Image (spheres, rainbow, N blue to C red):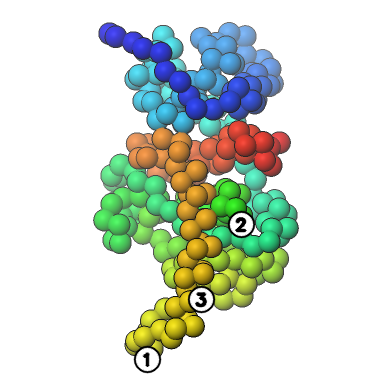
Amino acid sequence: MLSYPATIPLSSRTLNHLAERIRGHRKQRRSRWRRLEPGRQALLALAHLRNGDTYTRLAAGFEIGVATAWRYIQEAIALLATAADDLATAMERIRRLAYAILDGTLIPIDRVADQRPYYSGKHKHHSVNVQVIADAAGRLVWASPALPGSVHDLTAARAHGIIDALIRADVMTFADKGYQGARGSVRTPFKRRRFRPKLSRRQKTVNRAHAKIRARGERAIATLKTWKILAKLRCCPRRATAIVQAILVLHHVETDRYAA
């Protein structure tokens, strides 16, 4: 089998952060011996999450078994996911923003036994729905747990309590037409209706300005999806939430924002 060196576009700060968490976890469990030291296990997990490398390729590169690679990566993901902020903690930062941008994204998944809940009729593929909150500069602030892809964005935001939290905090929030009906402090563009087939010039102007602001929120989603594992999840969709939360923690460490 041929092999070659590869790079991971992350800083050593992120590697050291994850390695330290693994080291503390091993000390707590009093693990005496592992095939990989904490730094190598952290590198293994980052290669999987950032580069999307498969377990088989990683096992060959790190000279361990496929089952061992899977176990080490799942352990690292679980450690990171437990450190992720919940919505209440994130709202302490969000309420200090000039305004927030709310948007949803679909993460493709493999077909599963119970396909119907995960099939998005709009996008014509199986996926999970993740809600993303960005700041005025388009930087990723928070990402929600994953729901089946057939769930509408507004329904998902309400299920996570995002709409109520934003309204209670009185945070001006910009969202697309999929969130119409949220009301409160959530602002959505004007939409043509049966009794209003055409928008006025003023409404079109407002929509254009609204779209320019929302476009910054796309940066946050693009940032999230620079982690190649999210190109298509090839695992049980119930693991999607832990993966997204782990990535959120690593992203904040990498950008040195909200890092524990």
Relative image position of residue 255 (x, y in whole percent): 62, 37
Relative image position of residue 256 (x, y in whole percent): 67, 36
Q: Which residue is mark 2?
A: 136
Asked whether residue 245 appears in the rendered view, the answer is yes
Q: Of tags 1 and 3, which is closer to the observer?
A: 3
Relative image position of residue 171 (x, y in whole percent): 67, 66
* Image quadrant occupied by the N terminus: top left
Q: Which callout, 2 or 3, points at the residue further toward the start of the chain?
A: 2
Quadrant in which residue 68 is drawn: top left
Whether residue 80 is situated above or below residue 39 in the rendered picture: below
Q: Which one is nearer the viewer's eye here, 213 or 46?
A: 213
Q: Which callout, 2 or 1, points at the residue further toward the start of the chain?
A: 2
Q: Please name the residue shown 64% across and 62% down the image.
A: 99
Asked whether residue 83 appears in the rendered view, the answer is no
Whether residue 204 is situated above or below residue 153 in the rendered picture: below
Relative image position of residue 28 (x, y in whole percent): 69, 21
For the residues marked 1 and 3, what is the alpha-carbon distance in whole angstroms?
A: 20 Å
Q: Relative to 197, is 69 on the left or the right?
A: right
Q: Please name the residue shown 53% across and 37% down the image.
A: 247
Q: Which one is nearer the viewer's eye here, 193 or 21?
A: 193
Q: Which residue is mark 3?
A: 206
Q: Please name the residue shown 53% across and 62% down the image.
A: 213
Mark number displayed over residue 195? 1
Label 2 environment density (alpha carbons within 10 Å; few <14, some 14–19, many ≥20): some
Mark number displayed over residue 45? none
Give amino acid for label 3: Val
Label 1 environment density (alpha carbons within 10 Å; few <14, some 14–19, many ≥20): few
